[in-house]
Amino acid sequence: MYEGKAVSTGMSTQFEMVHLKKCPQQYAYLSGLLYLFKNKIGLTSLLSGETRVSARFTYVLHDWGIDGKWPAKPPDPEAVASHFGTLLYGCLEDPVTELQLAAVWPSMTGDLVIDNDIHSDFKPLSAPRWVVRLCYADDLTCLLSSYLYEFIKATNRTESMSDLLNVLEDHTTDKHLGQALEKITDPSAGGMLPGVKLASGLTKVVTDSQTLFRKSAYTLGRIAAVRGRIPREVLNNIKSYMFFQESTNSRQSSSQQQQASTYTFYHKLKAAPIDSLTHHLAMCAIVVNLCHGGLSALAQVWHVFVSELRTMLDNGECLPGIDSSKPDLNTCLLHQKLQMLNCCIQRKVLREQRSPRSSSEVDFKVNPSFVDISEDLTESNNHNNHMATDESKNETTPLKEVDKYDGNLETSENAAASSNHSERLSSNDSRGKFSVQSDDEDEFFECESDIDLGDTEQKHITSGDQHQEISEQQSLDQVSFTVNSNKTEDGAIISRDDVEHSTNENKDSMVDIDVSYPAEGRLKPCDDLNLLHCNSSLFIPHTQDHAPVTEDQLEEQAEVFSKLGDTKEGSKVRAKMQSASLRSDMEAFKSANPGCVLEDFVRWYSPRDFENGELSQRMKIPQNLWVTTWKSAKPVPAHRQKRIFDDTKEAEKVLHFLTNLKPAEAAQMLIPVCTHEALLVLRLASDAMKESLPSLPLICNQIEARAAQIFKQWHMYGSVANQFQPWTKDIQTKVEDLFRQITFAETMIERARSLQHKFRNLGDMAQVNAFVRQLLEHPEVPLDEAAVGPVGCIIKYYFQNQQNIVVEAESSLSSEQSEDVRLPKEIPPLPKPAGREFIIRASNSYPSTFSRKLPHRMYAVLMQNEFRLASAVSHDSTFF
C-alpha cells in the first residue's frame, strides 16, 4: 500500500496504490473496478457518459510454428571446425522469442460496457486498434561473436608454449594420478607431471585434460567437442591451408573486385591483406581456438607454423601469400616480420644462385624462376631522390653479356648472342640496384671494405691479339684500360693523352684523380653524362639494396638516436650510423667510374645538389658528411662489399622472435587480423540488410573508425626490437568494448533476418523491409486496419497455429492419462489475455455536490500473478 498527496491552490490530489500477487475475485473484471472507482469519488452512481474507460488486452505468441520457425539450421560441428576460409556468422537460435499483440479500445462509455464473469464486450478481433511489440533473446549465441570472445579469452592466459605442449604429451601417456610416482621414478620419463600454472605461482596436478581447456563462449562446446591433441589429419589440413601455393579462397575474386575501394581498409586497422599468410594463420588460429581445444590447440598450430617457417628458410622457399616488397609499416607487426623473413629468403636464394663458376669464361645465364624475384627486389628498392637527369628517356635496352676478363672489362660480341634471359632495364632508371647480372660478379663476400688486389684480382686485358699485364702500383703514364659500355659500341681505351688533357683543363680544381684500377660493377651508362675530369661515360653502378626494417626496429633505432643526445660526439656517431648506405653507394660508384670525383657522384645520386656546373651550398660546407665519406670511401664493387643487410642474421632474429612468443601473445598479435575479417563479414551482411536496417551501415562505419583508432594506438613493441610488448589493460578494455559493438551489430542483423522470414508473405520485399524496419526502430508498432489488415491476418494465422498446437498437446496428454477431457467445439483464434489494463476517468464534484468538478483517474493491471491498482482522486479545498 502506497499513498501520497499533491496540494495546489484551491485543490489537492490524493494518490493511492495497491500491489498484490493475486487479484481479488470481486475486482477481476471491469464491473468491479467501476464500482470501486465510484466509491472512491464518493458517489455510487454517475450519469451515463460521465465515466470513460480505456482498455488494453495483451496476447502473447510463443510458438511461431513451422512457417515462422527460425530458418537457420544448427551448424554441423565438423563443418565449423574445418571451415577456415572465413568466419561464420549467425545465431544458433531464434533471436525473436515472442510477439506481444495488444488489442486496444481507446475510449468507451463505462456504463455501456459489460465485462463480468459471464459476458464480456471486449472482443479482440473487433478491437479498433492493434499494436505489436517484440521480445528478443538475451545473451544470444552468435557465431561471429563467439569466435571473438573466445579468442580474447585466450589472450589472458600465461602458459608458455613448452608448458602446453609438455602437458599434452604427458597426458597421452598418463591418464591417472596413481601413475605419478611411477613416472617420477622412471628414468626414461621425458616430461613432468601434467600441471597448470596458477596465479600464485604454484602448480596444480590434474588428471583430466578437460580441466586444461576452456569450453566455448556461449556453450559452443556442445557444437564442437573440446579435444586435447589435434589429430594429425586435421593438422595437415590446417598446414595445407596456411601455406597454400595457390589461393583457393572463393572470396579472392570478390575481394579483388572491391580492391579499388577497400584496398586501404586493412591499412587503417594495421591488419594484413586478405589471403595473405598472416590472414590464413589468423583464420586457422581463431577457428582452432574455438573448436579444437582452446589455447592448447592454438599452441600446436603455432608450433607447426614456426617449424614450417624454419623449413622454408632452410630450403630457400619463399613464403606463400607474402609479397616481395619491404615490410609494410601500415600492417600488423606479425605481417611485417613475415615480410622481413620473406626478404631474407629471397636474398638467400639470389646469393646462392650467384655462386661463382670454376671456368675462366662464364656464359651468363639467368634462372628464369628467379628473374621475377630479382625484378621485384630491384623495383621495390628504387628511390626517387636518385635521378640521373630530369629528362629521362623511355626506351629500353638489353644488357649485354660480359666475358670473364684478366685486368679490365672488354666488350664481347659473342656474348650478346647468348643473352636470351637478360633483364631489360629502362634508361630512365635513376639508380642501378644490385640484381642478377653475372654468376661471379654479383656474389657478396663477408669481408671488409678494402679491396684485396692479390693474385686473384690480377687480370689481363685482351685487346685484339695483344695482351698487356696491369699491376696495382702502375703509374698514371702506364695505365690504359677498356670500358665496357654494355649499351654502345664505345670500347675505347682511356689514353695517356686524354688523361693529361683532362688534367690540364682542370688543374685549377686540384682534384686528386685516381684511375689506377679497373672498372667493376657497372650496370649501364647514365644517359649521355660523362665524367667531369675524364673523357669517359658516367656509369650507373650496381649497389646494395637498402636494409628493410620493421616497425619495432625503427623504434629501437629512434631510441638509440635519442639517447645519443645533441652533443658533438653524439652527432658524429649518429652520422656514422646513418652513412653506411651512402658509403656503400660511393664505393660502388668509384669502382664503376675510375677517375670520378665527388661532383660526378652528386650529379647521379642527388641531381638537385649540382646546379650551374657546381655543387650546392650545403655540399660546399667544409668537412660535411658527404665530403668526409667520399674521401674515406674506396673503390669497392657492391659484390665485394660487406653486406649492409645480413639476411642470415635477420632471418634468425625473426624466427627467434616468433619461437619465444607465448600462445597468448601470438593471439594478441593476430587480434587486428581477426577483427579485420570480422568487420568484413559484418560489412557484407549489413549491405544485404540495409533495406531493413538503414542505420546499420552507419553503425559499421562507427565500429570501423573505432577499431582503426584502437589499433593505431596499440604498439606491440617496446624500445628493444624483437621483443613483444603485451597489451595494457586500457587497450584490452577498448578491444572488449569493440567486440561488444560487433556483437550488437550482428544481433541486429539476425533479428532483421528472422523478422523478414516471419513476415515474408506480407507482400513484396519493399513492404516486408518497411515493416521490419518499423519493428526494429520502435518499441511498439500500430497495425493498419487492425485484425483485418495484411499484417493482422498473418499474426492471426500464427496465433491460430499456436492454439492448434496447444489443443493437440492437451488432447494427447489427456489420452495418456486416460482422462475424459472435453475439448472445445471451436478453437478460439486467440488465447486468453496474458494481461489486462484499464484506465477509468471521470470528472465530478468532490467531496460534495457543491464543489467544483475536478478530474479523477484510476489505473488497473490484472495479470495471472499480479494485481496493481493506482488511483488519483482530486478534492476541492476552497471551502473544505
Image (cartoon, grey):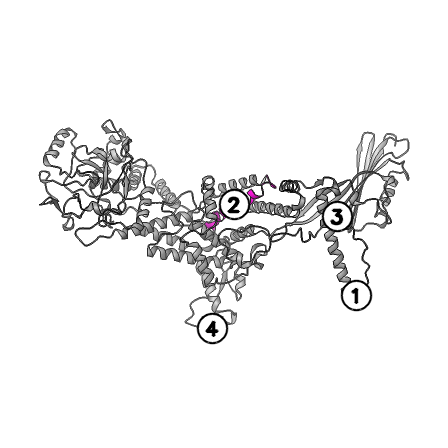
Sequence-first disc among 4 and 1? 4
- Cα–Cα gap, marks 4 and 1: 63 Å
On screen, residue 167 versus residue 643, left or right, reads: right
Q: Residue 696 is drawn in which quadrant?
A: top right
Q: Mark 3: give few (<14), some (14-19) or many (20+) Cα within 10 Å.
A: many
From the image, tell me which residue sits under label 3.
59
Sequence-first disc among 3 and 2? 3
Judge whether 319 appears above or below 474 on screen.
below
Q: Magenta-highlighted stretch: main secondary structure? A: helix
- Cα–Cα gap, marks 3 and 1: 31 Å
Q: Residue 473 is drawn in which quadrant?
A: top left
Callout in the foreground (2, 4): 2
Callout in the foreground (2, 1): 1
Amino acid on which disc 3 is placed? Tyr
Q: Which mark is residue 679?
A: 2
Q: Is residue 687 magenta?
A: yes
Residue 221 x/y as whole percent = 57, 58
Callout in the foreground (3, 1): 1
Amino acid on which disc 4 is placed? Glu
- Cα–Cα gap, marks 2 and 4: 52 Å
Q: Which stretch is magenta?
A: 668-694
- Cα–Cα gap, marks 2 and 1: 58 Å
Q: Depth check: 597 or 180 in front?
A: 597
Sequence-first disc among 3 and 4? 3
Residue 517 x/y as whole percent = 15, 42
From the image, tell me which residue sits under label 1.
818
Q: Contact, CB < 8 Å: mark 3 with mark 2?
A: no
Amino acid on which disc 1 is placed? Ser
From the image, tell me which residue sits under label 4.
182
Q: Depth check: 684 or 797 in front?
A: 797
Amino acid on which disc 2 is placed? Leu
Q: Residue at x 36, y 56 (%)?
A: 310
